[in-house]
Image: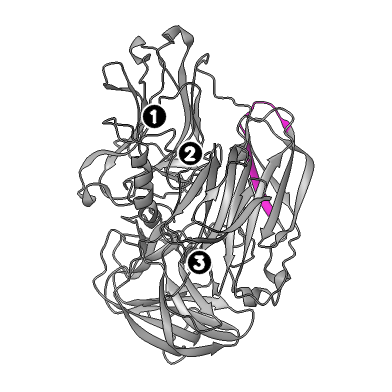
Amino acid sequence: MIRKSIVLGLALAIAPWAKGQTEGVLPLKKNTQLQGYGGFQQRYWQSLQVGTASHGLTDTLSLPFFDDFSADRVYPSASKWTDHAVFVNPDFPINPPSLNVATFDGLNSQGRAYDNLSGGFGSADTLTSQAINLSALLPSDSVMLSFFYQAQGRSFEVLTVDDSLVVQFKNKIGAWVNVWQSPGITRQDFKAAVVALGDSGYFHEGFQFRFLNYQTYIGNLKQWHVDYVYLNQGRNSADTVFEDQAMVYLPETPFNTYTSLPWAHLQSNFNKYLKTNYTIPVNNLSNSGETFSIGIRGEDENGQVGGVNLQGQSLAASGQSSFNLTPVFTLQPNSQDSSYLILTSKLGDILGGNDIKENDSAIRYVELANYYAYDDGTAESGYGIRNGAGSVSCGFELEQGDTLRAISIHYTQAETPVSSGVTLNIWRSLAPVGQPNIGVDVLAHSFNAGLPTYTDTINGFHVYKLDTALYFDSKVYVGWTQNGAFMLNVGLDRNYRYQGQDTANPNVLYNVSGRWEQSSVSGTPMIRVHFGKAIPNPLSAGPQAKVNKAIIFPNPSSTRIHIEGLDIIKHYQIFSIDGRMVMSGKDTESIAIGELQTGIYFLRCQDVNGNQYQGKLNKH
């Protein structure tokens, strides 16, 4: 999943902007996931207009209003919000109340920097509720808005006092009134805020509230995260306790070392790569302990491949607890070119009650195609050599000997444009770290890659198909050499974990002085290597590269959905939030969902041209 960008600090003795030739990072000025979804989502929002001047307004809502964003991805729900500048994601916050938050930063709804990085100051992202009818209520009915918020999150850029998050209410005469704000604060746990509607001017049939962040227009450097937004009557200022238990993150990736492996290689040694232990954090928003069950299960195209469910688990009051699960996943070898694995973590049997069912489960989709990958397909920053010439290498240990067919790289459009080309290199071996490499490195192939090729498709990778087949027995090193002083800005996946730790990928090296050194930047560059059969054109790379700019339309829906951006659907599968396949079909232009129960589902489909799509479906 690509997300918006964050500024990353280096684990070096010098600041990343200091002079000196070294590796470095830069913040992004674009978000390719928002760009990929933008056109189709924009048309979806436009379709909801009902002749009003206010973009995106739907029928007036009634109390209660609630959204923890667990049912959405990329954009907030159009049934609850009138705009979509914020970025809904599970990755930027640290220990949120529940899965997914709304992230406020310096990039607009199309994933581009506000005011073209002018350096001016003003409002950035806005999240505005649909109109809510409060005309039958009075201030004495104790209507209050509550939410949880966090500054900075996983971003390394500390907010200043000039940065702020603001809440405004819309009164009877249409004026927006500031009712709450927080100046820029250092990173900390999510905090609860409660704001009362104490003025009679707010009690009308078109009441709205909105969140805004203010910052300098210098790209995605500052971040606020908002979750668990709740408006209702009969509340008090201490009303921040909920009878709800929720997933916090997506399930971990299922492999030790890699996020994806070639299906042909993985089949040679399933047990070597499949994890046997999963840590699942669960948040309890109640002030009482609970007894519940927790499970994780795996599913492939043939059905369930294993899992485990633990009964009678104890969840401490008012906070997060982590549970270790040891599922056994039994994957079956076959002669297909690719496969996939869907992991679902799930809560159940909560004795004390559970208000929000949508956040009781989390689903991760893993494609197994023809490539090795360390990254999860999402870039939080741009990585490269700073202030001079140098080389970067990423090493991949192979499960079996095979023919290298292509290299794929995700390039980010970061704050500094790239004006010079690079040479892409493939090495068979490198000199030991810290020792002179001249005459020691064994170069298998190199070619001039020119300037970076940016792809605005979701999780877009540019694929370099090799003009010669190269066979490798056990290990391959791929990377680049640059002769000028610029940042290439290869995507950096900040959520990479080595042995569960937030650290640099030990397989990434850089060379600016005639010696290879271990990377000091937390995360991993988004570089992949493709093996096996010759790759036809058009090329496919990465878990989302075959995905057109597609979106479920409409979503939510009660009767029928279309996958805008795909051709005739060859086959589809719909999974419940606990991982069960509840519907499937083939050869259709749209999917009838009337027989499904109201709730959240996971859809996976492929069209007749091989384009794939997977995402959450909200059935009304």
Task: Check the image and report above or below for 478 versus 310.
Answer: below
> Which residue is tagged 2?
188
- Badge 1 marks a residue whose secondary structure is loop
- Residue type, numbered disc 3: Val
Which one is in front, 107 or 480? 107
Where's residue 174, x and y in %? 27, 21
Task: Check the image and report above or below for 471 versus 197.
Answer: below
Left or right, 496 with respect to 161, comes to right
On residue 149, which mark appears? none
The disc, 1 or 3, on the residue closer to the chain's N-terminal end is 1
- Badge 3 marks a residue whose secondary structure is loop
Magenta-colored span: 278-290
Which of pointers 1 and 2 indicates the residue nearer the eye?
1
- Residue type, numbered disc 1: Gln
- Tell me what residue is drawn at x 53 percent, y 38 percent: 558
Whether the residues at callouts 3 and 2 have beta carbons within 8 Å, the answer is no
Where's residue 45, x and y in %? 36, 41
Which one is in front, 186 or 80? 80
- Tell me what residue is drawn at x 65 percent, y 26 percent: 287
On residue 130, which mark appears? 1
